[in-house]
Image: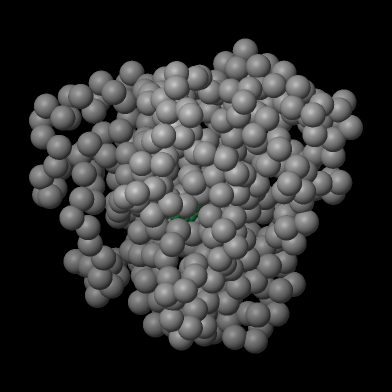
Amino acid sequence: MTHSETLFEQAQKYIPGGVNSPVRAFRGVGGTPIFFKHAEGAYLYDEDGKRYIDYIGSWGPMILGHSDKRIKDALHAQVDLGVGYGAPTSIETDMARKVCELVPSIDLVRMVNSGTEATMSAIRLARGYTRRDKIVKFEGCYHGHVDSLLVKAGSGALTLGVPNSPGIPASLAELTLTLDFNDIEGVRETFKEMGDEIAAIIVEPVAGNMNCIPAAPGFLECLREVCDEHGTVLIFDEVMSGFRVSLGGAQELYGVTPDLTALGKVIGGGLPVGAFGGKREIMEHISPLGPVYQAGTLSGNPLAMCAGLTTLNVISEPGFHDRLTQKTLALRDGLKAAADEAGIALTVQGAGAMFGLFFTEEPSITRFDQVMRCDTERFKKFFQGMLKEGIYLAPSAFEAGFTSAALSGDDIAETIAAAKKVFATL
Ligand code: PMP
């Protein structure tokens, strides 16, 4: 028995399914989840001492790689000053200023503790601001485990086959209209029929919870247009894409400006952080300025702000995202070439430092139904083969992959060599 197997057995006695977030349980790929002991740069080390090249990066936050010295130093210094006060600190203003500078659509920003809180609060704010109840989301997009948003969602909800979780009142789910991602016509028709009743559209501009599907040309523009026509709030969920697909997020990459943005992952540098922000006129409806209530005991926690702000400062260095995108493209191209050589039908796509691997004959994936037709059995075998080779990919065919600045050319070459070996066995 490996240490991970023993630890997983113990964990299951006290933690539901042995994990604190479902996709970690490896249900989508079989086998035992790996328990990790430490991490450094591009590598994770498990409890048995095995090294893995990491393409999950704690599900997105570790854009600099693990145990970055600059983050560790900032955290150590803050620990000496105190780990939290529940009162204002100057670092919160520094963080807010930085976010507003990097994402120009954000005039005011409120820090929270997770991506879920960020989307939940953005939805409440949009409803409070418009005095409307209905919202639009897209099938396969995941926005955290918010009641209103856990309707036809992606990520673990897809892997586990529970797109509509029990415990969500039908009367609430009813207010969530789910449309097809990248379907411009569907959006236009819905808005023609009931646009004036819709408080918000929430969308992942690069969908990363049904594998990785960037918005098709014209799709985000269409969302902006219908929102303008009908007084609907456009919310970009950039929890994954923010500070990752480019410094200013997907809104910078695609040149479409939302009213509100939800952020998470990179903004916390590995600590539990989320944020939502946007147009001053809308954000001024949040308490204590306005009547829409939102709060948090640990929100703006100094340790979390330290790790996040240090990360944002480092990734603001000129050329950071160009270099990271180039690395990610080298990985994508190498994997595609290796699959072609082995006669394996594989489509590789992505945006910036996000990528997706689809076992399919279809050359481009833009829709949810195409994702559902991919060969998940083949993915499982690929995943397990890569794991044996020391390559740690997301344990689900429905999650995007993430790269980090710590990855070297050698790491990428090692990953492609491993994939060649595994493709030969599929
Ligand atoms: N939105 C998106 C796009 C996400 O990918 C996630 C998490 N993967 C969330 C929201 C929820 O974030 P959290 O898990 O921090 O609550």
Viewer-proximal residue among 382 and 365: 382
Viewer-proximal residue among 370 and 387: 387
State how many labels appear.
Answer: 0
Tell me residue 339's x, y (percent): 81, 30
Residue 260, located in which quarter of the rendered image?
bottom left
Residue 340, located in which quarter of the rendered image?
top right
Tell me residue 134's x, y (percent): 49, 80
Above or below 347: residue 260 = below
Residue at 54% of width from left, 71% of height from top? 164
Image position of 268 (left or right of 87): right
Image position of 31 (left or right of 187): left
Above or below 414: residue 207 = below
Quadrant the C terminus occupies: top right
Identify the coloring: one colour
Q: Residue furthest front?
A: 1
Viewer-proximal residue among 129 and 229: 129
Tell me residue 75's x, y (percent): 23, 28
Above or below 15: residue 319 = above
Asked whether residue 255 is in view, the answer is: no
Residue at 65% of width from left, 80% of height from top? 190
Tell me residue 366's x, y (percent): 74, 54
Q: Residue furthest top?
A: 410
Asked whether residue 56 is in view, the answer is: yes
Residue at 52% of width from left, 65% of height from top? 202
Residue at 56% of width from left, 49% of height from top? 27
Viewer-proximal residue among 149 and 191: 149
